[in-house]
């Protein structure tokens, strides 16, 4: 693995997505079912936003500053659509950008995920700091994990 390795070799391909019209309850289900911390928002195959676990927590905590209010939190999640919460001004990578490119962007912006899009802004994957940690583990510890 080298710094010049294209990110398509380490990114998560075809990540779980939601649409702008979905409710935040759908996002909660993705977080719980998959353990993801970032969910791309796609409309007509095009990336239009991203919802992070932090966005989700801000929504829940802004309405009820008490996580014990489960029933009320569920009402809020069912009533709030993704479009109201998602981040839309996204920095994205292309699949041929390199591991080094991703590292520099993560460091400069303190992001934890970057969507990967094609030339038409269609979502093709997502790369996270966790993906990069796996690469670093292979480099420094000598672990050999298969690369898709």
Image: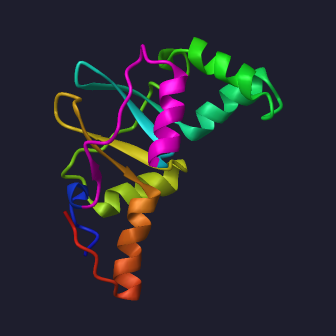
Q: Quadrant of residue 69?
A: top right
Q: Quadrant of residue 70?
A: top right
Q: Quadrant of residue 62?
A: top right
How many numbered badges does the structure rendering display?
A: 0
Judging depth in this view, the residue of 94 and 72 nearest the camera is: 72
Residue extending furthest toward the front: 71
| Relative to 73, residue 12 above or below | below
State the scheme by which the image is colored.
Answer: rainbow
Give left or right: position of 41 versus 4.
Answer: right
| Relative to 30, residue 107 above or below | below
Residue 103 visible at all:
yes
Which quadrant would the N terminus be assigned to in this image? bottom left
Residue 29 x, y percent position in the rendering: 50, 34
Q: Residue at x 68, y 31 (%)?
A: 58
Which quadrant would the C terminus be assigned to in this image? bottom left
Residue 90 x, y percent position in the rendering: 42, 32
Residue 16 x, y percent position in the rendering: 35, 38
Residue 86 visible at all:
no
> What's the magenta region?
10-34
Give left or right: position of 132 versus 87.
Answer: left
Q: Residue at x 44, y 27 (%)?
A: 89
Q: Is residue 114 magenta?
A: no
Q: Residue at x 66, y 35 (%)?
A: 57
């Amino acid at each position: 693995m080298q710094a010049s390795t294209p990110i398509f070799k380490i990114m998560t391909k075809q990540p779980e997505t939601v649409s702008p019209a979905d409710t935040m309850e759908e996002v909660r289900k993705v977080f719980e079912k998959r353990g993801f911390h970032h969910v791309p928002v796609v409309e007509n195959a095009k990336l239009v936003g991203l919802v992070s676990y932090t966005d989700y927590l801000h929504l829940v905590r802004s309405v009820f500053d008490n996580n014990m209010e489960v029933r009320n939190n569920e009402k809020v999640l069912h009533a709030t659509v993704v479009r109201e919460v998602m981040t839309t001004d996204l920095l994205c990578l292309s699949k041929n950008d390199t591991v080094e490119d991703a590292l520099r962007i993560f460091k400069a912006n303190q992001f934890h995920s970057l969507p990967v899009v094609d030339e038409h802004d269609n979502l093709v994957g997502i790369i996270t700091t966790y993906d990069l940690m796996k690469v670093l583990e292979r480099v420094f510890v000598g672990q050999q994990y298969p690369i898709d």
